Image (cartoon, rainbow, N blue to C red):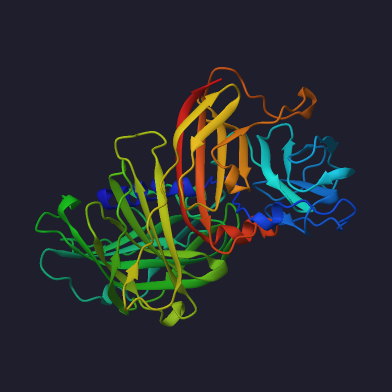
């Protein structure tokens, strides 16, 4: 049992790279052409949830909202700097109580470099912005691992009526809560309680003396569903050693419509009796990029606002295809759809390894199998010289983004988005005044991370990060220590 729990923990840690991806973007060449000198675009201010760009090309006027990347709340008193990319222009301002700074200048036309800073937050710079409304989200310098939780206890209906498992087999009901779309987020990897070294969020049948089915789980807060996967565990005759076990999905149960608050205590929750509607499909895997040697596959059923029900995790390194058991979309899953994520990384790099993932979403029928897209190569050649950050931009990306960290504690100092992919490969950060209140970029060693992303149907002149996050098809990341 502990080994199975560990495999899921490793899977979530690998997928954590998805949590802190910098802002998504895509270059649209038509959006980069400067409008005629007399053109004016005085768009009404619009706050874009989560961050983004909208309202047509910049022509004399620009509205910049600055929001907290965690809460979405406007940040009053934030410093904003606008530097022209086609004109010799530099404008500065401060956000009002609504988190808004407005700019007007006859030279303010076409793509701009927009930076924002505020005390307690990492700086953020977006290159190639060409929309009259911009919302930039600022993230805390320190990673926020404080997660709101609820304590949930219960049982599985008709568990005692399950037939006895076959010889050398166990029934295991792994209980979980649905993930948020932020799959690698801390809210999706909450440490679960154990009893005598076994996970408390599971029920077991087939031991010499079966314990009662009284599971205990620490769940996230918010809208969610609780569920369990009924696993047929072939112990291979060694019930105390799970390293050689074969786990097969045999059934499931889902309790939808839940909404938990921080600190809530739920007792006697009754998960429905097992539904034995399962099938098996074949997932064809992509070749690993050069230098990467480990691949994992995760499968989910999306339940809309209630989140993602994880039904499989397989370590599939060295395989060209994987056989995956999955729940059919019946009973409580009739409105759901399937999603698969494959993650490849380098097992030899223990800290911040190069990582790449592919995503297949909105699948309603798995009977014909699933083909995972080719991986996006991680960036290489990350370096810093004469204040210019450089990297070899991998082909096929829609946007390149970066982040600068203090390697001593990995605090985030600066996040960067390059909305013009033709400029991907290098950037020089703008000089912000000491009065900006933002993070300082120190001299010495820095961790420089580059993320390449492909987003379906993305328009750099009109996007919301909240909407774009679900459209990412492929992404990759790599980092290196550079010296300033």
Q: Position of residue 279 (x, y in %)?
A: 28, 76
Residue 62 versus residue 298 in the image, above or below: above
Please state if 7 lies on the left or on the right of 271 as rendered.
Answer: left
Residue 432 is left or right of residue 444, and the answer is right
Residue 82 place in picture, x, y as percent: 78, 39
Q: Which residue lies furthest to the top in this view?
A: 444
**Quarter placement of the C terminus:** top right
Q: In which quarter of the image is residue 125?
A: top right
Q: Which residue is drawn at 84% across and 36% down?
A: 91
Q: Relative to 50, is 253 on the left or the right?
A: left
The residue depicted at 31 percent of the width and 77 percent of the height is 368
Q: Is residue 192 visible?
A: no
When the figure is inspected, residue 284 is found, relative to residue 439, above or below; the finding is below
- Give the quadrant of residue 260: bottom right
In the rendered image, is residue 125 in sight? yes
Question: Residue, x 47% and y 53% (percent of image)?
Answer: 396
Relative image position of residue 244 (x, y in whole percent)? 15, 53
Residue sitting at the far front: 36
Q: Which of 362 and 208 is in front in this view?
A: 362
Please state which of residues 172 and 276 is positioned toward the viewer in this rendering.
276
> Observer-nearest residue: 405 or 450?
450
**How many callouts does the rendering have?**
0
* Left or right of residue 160: residue 91: right
Residue 77 x %, y %: 82, 37
């Amino acid at each position: 049992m502990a080994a199975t729990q560990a495999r899921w923990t490793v899977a979530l840690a690998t997928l954590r790279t998805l949590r802190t991806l910098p802002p998504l973007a895509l270059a649209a060449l038509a959006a980069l052409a400067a409008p005629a000198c007399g053109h004016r675009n005085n768009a009404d201010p619009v706050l874009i949830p989560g961050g983004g760009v909208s309202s047509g090309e910049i022509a004399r006027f620009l509205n910049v909202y600055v929001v907290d990347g965690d809460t979405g709340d406007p940040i009053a008193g934030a410093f904003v700097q606008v530097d022209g990319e086609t004109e010799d222009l530099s404008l500065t301002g401060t956000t009002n109580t609504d988190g808004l700074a407005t700019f007007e200048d006859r030279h303010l036309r076409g793509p701009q470099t927009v930076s924002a800073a505020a005390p307690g937050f990492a700086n953020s710079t977006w290159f190639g912005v060409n929309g009259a409304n911009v919302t930039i989200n600022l993230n805390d310098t320190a990673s926020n691992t404080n997660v709101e939780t609820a304590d949930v206890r219960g049982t599985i209906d008709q568990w005692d009526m399950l037939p006895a498992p076959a010889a050398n087999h166990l029934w295991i009901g792994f209980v979980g809560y649905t993930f948020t779309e932020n799959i690698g987020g801390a809210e999706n990897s909450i440490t679960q309680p154990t009893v005598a070294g076994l996970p408390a969020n599971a029920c077991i049948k087939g031991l010499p003396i079966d314990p009662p089915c009284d599971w205990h789980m620490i769940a996230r807060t918010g809208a969610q569903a609780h569920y369990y996967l009924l696993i047929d565990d072939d112990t291979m005759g060694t019930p105390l050693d799970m390293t050689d076990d074969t786990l097969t999905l045999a059934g499931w149960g889902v309790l939808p419509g839940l909404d938990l608050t921080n600190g809530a205590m739920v007792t006697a929750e009754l998960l429905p009796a097992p539904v034995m509607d399962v099938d098996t499909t074949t997932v064809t895997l992509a070749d690993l990029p050069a230098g990467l040697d480990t691949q994992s596959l995760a499968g989910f059923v999306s339940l809309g606002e209630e989140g993602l029900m994880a039904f499989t995790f397989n370590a599939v390194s060295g395989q060209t295809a994987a056989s995956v058991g999955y729940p059919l979309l019946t009973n409580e899953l009739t409105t759901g759809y399937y999603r698969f994520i494959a993650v490849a990384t380098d097992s030899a790099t223990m800290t911040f390894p190069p990582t790449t993932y592919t995503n297949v979403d909105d699948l309603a029928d798995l009977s014909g199998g699933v083909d995972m897209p080719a991986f996006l190569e991680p960036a290489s050649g990350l370096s810093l010289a004469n204040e210019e950050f450089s990297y070899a931009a991998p082909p096929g990306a829609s946007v390149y983004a970066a982040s600068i960290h203090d390697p001593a504690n990995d605090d985030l100092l600066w996040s960067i988005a390059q909305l013009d992919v033709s400029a991907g490969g290098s950037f020089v950060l703008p000089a912000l005044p000491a009065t900006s209140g933002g993070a300082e970029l120190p001299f010495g060693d820095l961790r420089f991370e580059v993320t390449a992303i492909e987003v379906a149907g993305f328009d750099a002149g009109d996007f919301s990060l909240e909407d774009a996050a679900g459209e990412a098809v492929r992404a990759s990341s790599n980092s290196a220590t550079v010296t300033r």
